Amino acid sequence: GQNIDQPTEMTATEGAIVQINCTYQTSGFNGLFWYQQHAGEAPTFLSYNVLDGLEEKGRFSSFLSRSKGYSYLLLKELQMKDSASYLCAVGAIGSARQLTFGSGTQLTVLP
Amino acid sequence: DVKVTQSSRYLVKRTGEKVFLECVQDMDHENMFWYRQDPGLGLRLIYFSYDVKMKEKGDIPEGYSVSREKKERFSLILESASTNQTSMYLCASSLRQGASYEQYFGPGTRLTVT
């Protein structure tokens, strides 16, 4: 099975940097995903890591350490529109490469 | 752009009714998924399908069934709706092969069972 932990809530200030951590325990690992979900909307894909290291995509970066079962999402130059829930998800080695999601981290960006 | 659509944004049903939720994707994806999302519990996988007429149980299949008669369409069925099935239901699709297999989500159906 899969067990995924991430903080429930975080608060940060506009223009700052915030790091959202995710730890996981899994019986089969096939990559780690981060999704963003604004209130009342569907999740949208942010990043995918399958190898150790940092993947950078504009203001967002994602890091993975497979040996530690650990990932983080780094958001730089925070904007008010970044207020959302951030979901960590682990991919399985399965027929549909299905994902198991964490409960999400609600990020609030304050002016 | 991948588009995943769901038949209704909001639905209100009575206890005991049979409920159909439909999902259609236009990107020729092999995989399709149904989730429910509840506060504090995150997204939980109900059923998924990796090909036409193929289906597998997810983590919480009890009280639900699915149908995949065409590649682009995946239906979730609540045989006899109960109040504990009040939730947000999200459909998603993804490629079965290839390096990138991120899931694309529909807008969701908020189902209320009274």
Image (spheres, coloured by chain):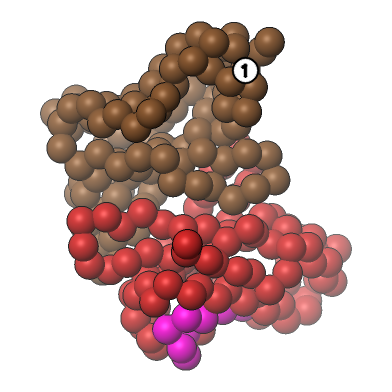
Query: Is residue A61 part of the magenta span, yes or no?
Result: no
Query: Is residue B73 part of the magenta span, yes or no?
Result: yes
Q: Is residue A32 left or right of residue B23?
A: left
Depicted A102 relative to depicted B64: above or below: above
Q: Is residue B28 left or right of residue B90?
A: left
Closer to us: B70 or B43: B70
Give the dominant element type of the magenta stretch: helix, strand or loop.
strand
Depicted A87 relative to depicted B74: above or below: above
- The residue drawn where x is 65% and y is 48% is A41
**Residue B2 appearing in the image:** yes
Q: Is residue A16 left or right of residue A62?
A: right
x, y percent for residue A50: 20, 42
The hue used for chain A is: brown
Q: Label 1: how many residues lie within 10 Å, few (<14), some (14-19) or many (20+)?
A: many
- Quarter holding the C terminus of chain B is bottom right
Callout 1 secondary element: strand
Query: Which chain: red?
Result: B
Closer to us: B68 or B80: B68
Closer to us: A58 or B89: A58
**Residue A10 appearing in the image:** no
Label 1 marks which chain's residue?
Answer: A
x, y percent for residue B113: 80, 64
- The residue drawn where x is 28% and y is 68% is B96
Depicted B42 relative to depicted B83: above or below: above
The quarter of the picture where residue A55 lies is: top left
Q: Which residue is mark 1?
A: A109
Magenta range: B68-78
